[in-house]
Image (spheres, rainbow, N blue to C red):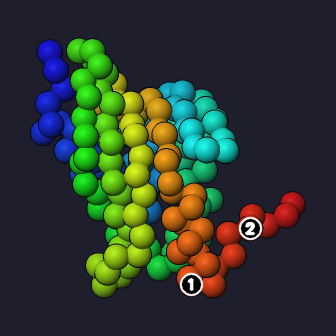
Amino acid sequence: MDIDTARITDYFDRYAASLTRFDAEASAELWSTPGMIVDDRFSGAVDSREEMATGLKQAYPVYRELGLGSVDYELVEENQLSDALVLVRVRWLFLDGDDEFLTDSNSYYLLRDEAAGLRACVCIETDSMQKLQALADAKGVDLTPPST
């Protein structure tokens, strides 16, 4: 049985809402474990939802400094791979507190239909680092991680 668009939309509605609320635990709950994130320079697996929530929380101060007020998305493409797997391309829209456009990014998600519902197994970021850096440069925000 295919995973229909309504279920995919519901999943990303909940994901965008959790990102808007800076609710790391709710965001992490939408992931399968382990979960994997891949971009041009990095591939990493997160073994637990707690680890994922901790990573998300570490990014929140930067997002707030950049003026993030809310997150929305556009469902661009969906490819049913099997009864339980769908590959989805999403364009994330990052808005300020007045719902004005800050930046966007494009990602692919491999979603699996699990007993608890749809969960992301893999996220492939295609341009988020470049666009986040451009926004930071425009706003004078340093994205260099603090040295330990």
Q: Which residue is mark 1?
A: 139
Distance from the alpha carbon under mark 1 to that under mark 2: 14 Å
* Residue at 14% from the left image edge and 30% from the top image edge: 4
* Residue at 29% from the left image edge and 57% from the top image edge: 73
Mark 2 crowdedness (10 Å alpha carbons): few <14, some 14-19, many ≥20: few
Residue 106 image position (x, y, % from top left)? 40, 52
* Residue at 44% from the left image edge and 29% from the top image edge: 121
Which amino acid does the dot numbered 1 rest on? Lys
- Tell me whether circle 1 and circle 2 mark residues in contact (CB < 8 Å): no
* Label of residue 144 in the image: 2
Residue 108 higher or lower than 145, as above or below: above
Which amino acid does the dot numbered 2 rest on? Thr
Residue 13 higher or lower than 93, as above or below: above
Asked which secondary structure carries label 2, the reply is loop
In terms of depth relative to the viewer, which is nearer, 72 or 125?
A: 125
* Residue at 56% from the left image edge and 72% from the top image edge: 134
Residue 31 placement, left or right of 89: right
* Label of residue 68 in the image: none
In terms of depth relative to the viewer, which is nearer, 88 or 56?
A: 88
Residue 23 placement, left or right of 60: left
Residue 137 placement, left or right of 77: right
Residue 38 higher or lower than 111, as above or below: below
